[in-house]
Image (cartoon, grey):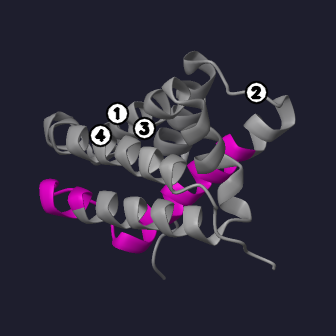
Amino acid sequence: MRNPTHQDPTILAAYQRSLDRVYGQSRELLAGAPTWQAGLFHSVRACYGEMRAHPDALHLHFVATARDAGVQAIRTRHRDRLIALLDETRTDAPPTLHAELMLSMIHATLRRQIVERQAPLDLDDAEQTFARLLFLYEAPQAA
């Protein structure tokens, strides 16, 4: 099977609870930030902190998601909820596609770094990645 579904429902349920905790914090983090980038930075930081605190969740979120349809579905739902929340809470929110691309770049970059190191990044390194991608990247301008 090319994209198997994770077989342990207990681990998947714990992963979902981790993402639900992050989502619960994100409304305040997004709304209280001076810009959408800063809000997303704080939300992604909270997510990474939650994942680091639960090694099974971190593995599912960054490693297993590449080959596990069940994990992929949970992570995609979380991303979609976060993007909708960003749009609901921020008048300066970027277009949905831009937000999706930003989150995809952050996730892919962290995944690569975690896989290459065979260990989670410390929070300082992760924050540098978030900041570099969120604050230095400029969206392509419409023609």
The residue carrying pointer 4 sits among few (fewer than 14), some (14 to 19) or many (20 or more) residues within 10 Å by Cα, namely: some
Residue drawn at (47%, 70%) of the image: 141
Residue 32's place in the image compared with 105, above or below, is above
* Residue topped by disc 4: 21
Image spot of residue 12 (x, y percent) = 50, 53
Residue 139 in sight from this viewpoint: no
Q: Which mark is residue 42?
A: 1
* Residue type at numbered disc 1: His
Residue 87 in sight from this viewpoint: yes
Magenta residue check for 86: yes
Is label 4 or label 1 in front? 4
* Residue type at numbered disc 3: Cys
Mark nearer the N terminus (1 vs 3): 1
Mark nearer the N terminus (1 vs 2): 1
Which span of residues is magenta-colored? Answer: 85-111
Q: CA distance from mark 4 to mark 1?
A: 14 Å
Please state the total of marks drawn on the protein image.
4
The N terminus: image quadrant: bottom right
Residue drawn at (77%, 45%) of the image: 112
* Residue type at numbered disc 2: Ala
Residue drawn at (57%, 68%) of the image: 70
Q: Quadrant of residue 80?
A: bottom left
Mark nearer the N terminus (2 vs 4): 4
* Residue topped by disc 3: 47
Magenta residue check for 37: no
Magenta span main SS: helix
Residue 35's place in the image compared with 121, above or below, is below
